[in-house]
Image (spheres, grey):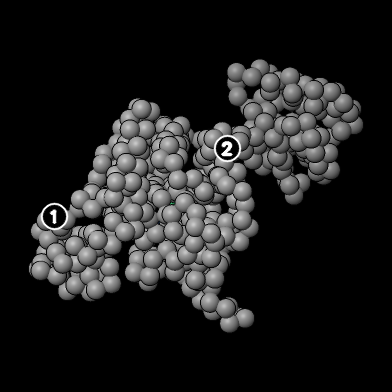
């Protein structure tokens, strides 16, 4: 877990604002759910996934309830849907921290932020296209170019049952590592995740789900790829695409960054999870969404040299060597007028306060000394040469002078 300090926080906020603007233009409303839920909400993500078996920050609270910090937001959103039963289509977006006990490295943290969307109640492949296109639009707005969109379909649950049987048969005959044998007993699909050399041959010879698609699943995926093509979005159909969560059905997708290590190159991903609301006690409801990792996305922006965000610069720094009360009045007046103003404290010397004014980055310093206080004036000192000379103005006209100067 790490701290995000100013000025980096300005960039985080700007990313959130850009995301909010992008998805709100498409009719999504913001949802905020608790950081902690009953652990049962998250076990629905998949009993055999690392996220659930190894990475949950689960604990018993003082009331003896089994709860967990959230590792993601999709399950929480579906829990909220089942609980509140809003009208469908329900289009929501979110932003916030998630917690997974992973081995931390560049791009992989134990607390990380996601922005994302979920839509409940729509089965139409056109929605899959909209959701994927929104994520792509967002990356484009950040200025990222080295992004690969990878898509695939996992078929319907019944297709998967037949496929998993075929996979199990295949892997049972194969020469797998001890670890993959253990995984096979729990979930043959997860064996495909193995990066171990000894497993590679069996994995590349494994059957593919596409051979087991029902007519509906095949038509749905065809409609998704046709829609993406119609929008001019480049994508790769990747049978080896493995999402780390078990609730997916039919469409899955991932956005991979070109500058990050392959283990952390997923900048975001998502897919359909048509059975999740039902598993959480709601009515059978189709759902689809994505979440983008904010930490990783910003690393990719660093690597590509895009999405520079300057924090709000100070307009004015007030130097008051008469005790500081005048600085209080002036900063309040300037802030009320919409200017960014800071000041020195502790009645420090003119020299010390001017040093602070310089360091603050403010465009103009306002100086109040004994003469100014007595004559009801203020000295206006531009901090950059191209802003003209120092001058004295009537105190009552200070704010309007500064507004003119800074507009
Ligand atoms: P996910 O693939 O587990 O999907 O996470 C989405 C993104 O969150 C990843 O692509 C990555 O950028 C970021 N992320 C995940 N774990 C970490 C970590 N430890 N450190 C830094 N970044 C991380 C989900 O969470 C699904 N809820 C997405 C979804 C929404 N599917 C449907 N709707």
Confirm or deny contact between disc 2 and disc 1 (CB under 8 A): no
The residue at the point 32 percent across, 41 percent down is: 219
For label 2, the SS is loop
For label 1, the SS is helix
Question: Can you tell which mark lies on residue 27?
Answer: 2
Q: Nearer the viewer, residue 130 or 264?
A: 130
Q: Is residue 260 visible?
A: no
Q: Position of residue 20 (x, y in %)?
A: 56, 40
Judged left or right of residue 263, residue 76 is right
Q: Is residue 278 above or below residue 132?
A: below
Q: Is residue 207 above or below residue 41?
A: above
Q: Nearer the viewer, residue 72 or 260?
A: 72
The residue at the point 56 percent across, 33 percent down is: 25
Q: Position of residue 45 (x, y in %)?
A: 42, 63
The disc, 2 or 1, on the residue closer to the chain's N-terminal end is 2
Q: Which residue is mark 1?
A: 204
Judged left or right of residue 96, residue 259 is left
Q: Nearer the viewer, residue 209 or 396?
A: 209
Q: Is residue 303 above or below residue 262?
A: above
- Does ligand 1 reach within 8 Å of label 2's beta carbon? no
């Amino acid at each position: 877990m790490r701290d995000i300090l100013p000025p980096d926080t300005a960039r985080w906020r700007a990313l959130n604002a850009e995301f909010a603007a992008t998805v709100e233009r498409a009719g999504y409303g913001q949802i905020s759910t608790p950081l902690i839920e009953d652990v049962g909400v998250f076990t629905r993500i998949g009993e055999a996934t690392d996220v659930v078996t190894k990475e949950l920050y689960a604990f018993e609270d003082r009331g003896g309830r089994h709860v967990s910090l959230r590792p993601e937001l999709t399950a929480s959103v579906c829990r909220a849907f089942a609980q509140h039963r809003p009208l469908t289509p329900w289009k929501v977006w979110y932003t916030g921290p998630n917690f997974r006990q992973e081995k931390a490295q560049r791009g992989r943290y134990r607390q990380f932020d996601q922005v994302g969307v979920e839509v409940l109640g729509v089965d139409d492949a056109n929605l899959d296209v909209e959701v994927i296109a929104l994520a792509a639009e967002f990356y484009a707005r950040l200025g990222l170019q080295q992004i690969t969109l990878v898509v695939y379909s996992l078929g319907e649950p019944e297709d998967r049952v037949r496929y998993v049987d075929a996979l199990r048969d295949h892997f049972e005959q194969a020469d797998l590592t001890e670890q993959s044998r253990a995984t096979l007993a729990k979930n043959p699909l997860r064996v495909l995740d193995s990066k171990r050399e000894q497993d590679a041959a069996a994995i590349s010879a494994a059957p593919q789900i596409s051979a087991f698609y029902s007519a509906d699943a095949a038509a749905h995926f065809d409609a998704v790829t046709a829609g993406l093509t119609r929008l001019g979005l480049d994508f790769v159909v990747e049978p080896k695409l493995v999402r780390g969560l078990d609730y997916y059905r039919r469409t899955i997708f991932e956005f991979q960054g070109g500058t990050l290590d392959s283990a952390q190159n997923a900048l975001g991903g998502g897919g359909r999870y048509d059975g999740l609301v039902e598993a959480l006690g709601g009515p059978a409801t189709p759902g689809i969404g994505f979440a983008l990792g904010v930490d990783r996305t910003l690393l990719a922006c660093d690597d590509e040299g895009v999405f520079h965000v300057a924090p709000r610069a100070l307009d004015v720094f007030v130097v008051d060597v008469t005790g500081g009360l005048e600085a209080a009045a002036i900063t309040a007046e300037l802030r009320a007028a919409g200017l960014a103003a800071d000041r020195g404290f502790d009645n420090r010397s003119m020299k010390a306060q001017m040093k602070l004014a310089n360091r603050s980055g403010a465009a103009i310093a306002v100086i109040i000394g004994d003469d100014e206080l007595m004559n009801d004036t203020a000295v206006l000192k531009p901090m950059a040469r191209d802003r003209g000379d120092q001058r004295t103005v009537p105190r009552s006209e200070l704010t309007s002078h500064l507004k003119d100067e800074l507009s």
